Amino acid sequence: MGVHIEAKSCAYAETVLLPGDPLRAKSMAEDLLDSVVLCNDVRGMLGFTGTYHGKKVSIQATGMGAPSISIYAHELVTEFGAKRLIRVGTCGAMDPELQLGELVFAQCASTNSSMNRHRFNGMDFAPCATFELLESAVNQARNKGVSFKVGGVMTNDFFYSDDPESWKIWARYGVLAMEMETSALYTLAASKAVEALSILTVSDSLHTGKALSPAQREKAYQDSAAIALALL
């Protein structure tokens, strides 16, 4: 039993999907899995285990930001035996060619977080996805006819920045999108020798200011969840 995950009523699967929103985790479990069991509700951070085409899979909410996802990913791996962590979340497009609803497969993650600087005594670490998961996700997207891009993302500690133009330096260096968790997830996966991938849906554009409506987000999540589950 972990501090933030109890899992009294079920066991977590080796593959865990990681949405940030607890209600998103609930709807994904109910809509996509069979034989669903509630595993965790500590602090309202819901977790579930069920089956998908006969294969066991779990879905655990992680909250927002690098510290939050680090807590849940750490406990899933060290306390419950998770081997494969797949973030299913959203991002803001910094690449002007990315359209709302498109998917971004995060190959690597830059960050302005100081977590890795503390971990590596002031040096930089380059957190990357597990290649086999990334390759499989690309193949699944192509087979399903889903529009996507592969590349670097930027994990931001700030949702509301004092400098609204700060994202442009990252865009200048080819970073595709901004989000808040991937760098921490990939770093933890590397430290624990487990697999990790972030599959991100473009929910808004930093260029145009346009954003998906709640109904559009619901539909867009179906593509990312379908690809994540196909990786089983």
Image (cartoon, grey):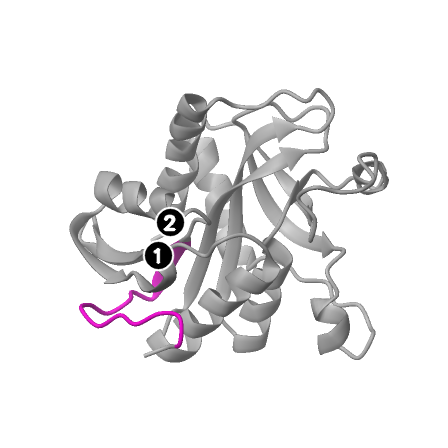
Residue 207 image position (x, y, % from top left): 74, 24
Q: Does 35 sit left or right of 189 as displayed?
A: left
Residue 45 image position (x, y, % from top left): 37, 57
Q: Is residue 9 magenta?
A: yes
Q: From what the image shows, is residue 232 above or below residue 166?
A: below
Q: Which residue is label 1 attached to? A: 44
The residue lying toward the viewer, choosing from 2 and 168, is 2
Q: Residue at x 45, y 54 (%)?
A: 86
Q: Which residue is label 2 attached to? A: 22
Q: Quadrant of the N terminus?
A: bottom left
For residue 186, which quarter of the picture? bottom right
Identity, as a three-letter code, of the amino acid under mark 2: Pro
Residue 151 image position (x, y, % from top left): 67, 43
Q: Does 113 sit left or right of 73 as displayed?
A: right
Residue 176 image position (x, y, % from top left): 70, 38
Q: Does 24 sit left or right of 151 as displayed?
A: left
At mark 1, the secondary structure is: helix
Q: Residue at x 46, y 49 (%)?
A: 20
Q: From what the image shows, is residue 223 above or below residue 229?
A: above
Magenta highlight range: 3-17
Q: How many numbered discs? A: 2
Q: From what the image shows, is residue 4 above or below residue 148?
A: below
Label annotation for residue 56: none
Identity, as a three-letter code, of the amino acid under mark 1: Gly
Report the Cα–Cα distance between label 2 and label 1. Answer: 7 Å
- Direction left: furthest residue: 35
Q: Residue at x 62, y 50 (%)?
A: 180
